[in-house]
């Protein structure tokens, strides 16, 4: 990950209307509010109290960064259909609301993030997938 996340934007192109085209698929992006929605799946079930602690620490980290406008985190609600999940069963979902693409890129180099991930991975291994998107509504 480059230290100066603005280098990423150097590789992006602007269309004639000033909308950002992403670096991979060349999809138009309006340049406004961004959401980063993350699904966390611990390899083995963990106690609810420990999941609460993970979510609390994650929320404190991102709120303290000054990069996000808001953060929301919730436990996954298990249903019988989860037994047929093709990839993993989620433990929790987290969503960051950010003012723009620059703030989103900066979250990937935010101080303390690597420490939080390493600490939790050593205690309870997990996988995370995410999607970066404009607000859904």
Image: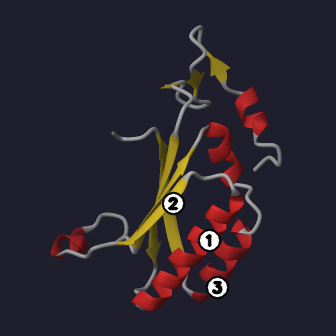
First in sequence: mark 3 or mark 2? 2
Determine the residue positioned at 61% across, 15% down. Answer: 18
Circle 1: is it few (<14), some (14-19), or many (20+) Cα within 10 Å? Answer: few
Marks 3 and 2 close (CB-CB < 8 Å): no
Determine the residue positioned at 57% across, 24% down. Answer: 21
Q: Name the mark on residue 118.
A: none
- Which of 125 and 134 lies nearest the eye of the viewer? 134
Q: Nearer the viewer, mark 3 or mark 2?
A: 2
Q: Nearer the viewer, mark 1 or mark 3?
A: 1
Indicate whether 91 appears above or below 26: below
From the viewer's perspective, tell me whether residue 60 is left or right of residue 35: right
Q: Name the mark on residue 71.
A: 2
Q: CA distance from mark 1 to mark 2?
A: 9 Å
* Callout 2 secondary element: strand
Residue 68, horizontal then vertical, whole percent: 60, 53
Tag 1 residue: 60
Tag 3 residue: 122
């Amino acid at each position: 990950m480059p230290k100066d996340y603005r280098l990423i934007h150097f590789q992006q192109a602007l269309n004639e209307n000033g909308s950002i085209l992403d670096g991979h698929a060349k999809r138009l992006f309006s340049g406004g509010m961004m959401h980063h929605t993350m699904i966390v799946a611990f390899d083995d079930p963990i106690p609810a109290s420990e999941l609460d602690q993970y979510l609390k620490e994650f929320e404190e980290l991102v709120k303290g960064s000054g990069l996000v406008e808001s953060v929301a985190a919730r436990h996954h609600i298990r249903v019988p259909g989860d037994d047929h999940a093709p990839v993993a069963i989620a433990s929790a979902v987290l969503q960051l609301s950010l003012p723009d693409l620059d703030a989103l890129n900066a979250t990937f180099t935010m101080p303390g993030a690597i420490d939080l991930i390493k600490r939790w991975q050593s205690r309870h291994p997990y996988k995370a997938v995410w999607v970066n998107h404009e607000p859904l509504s």
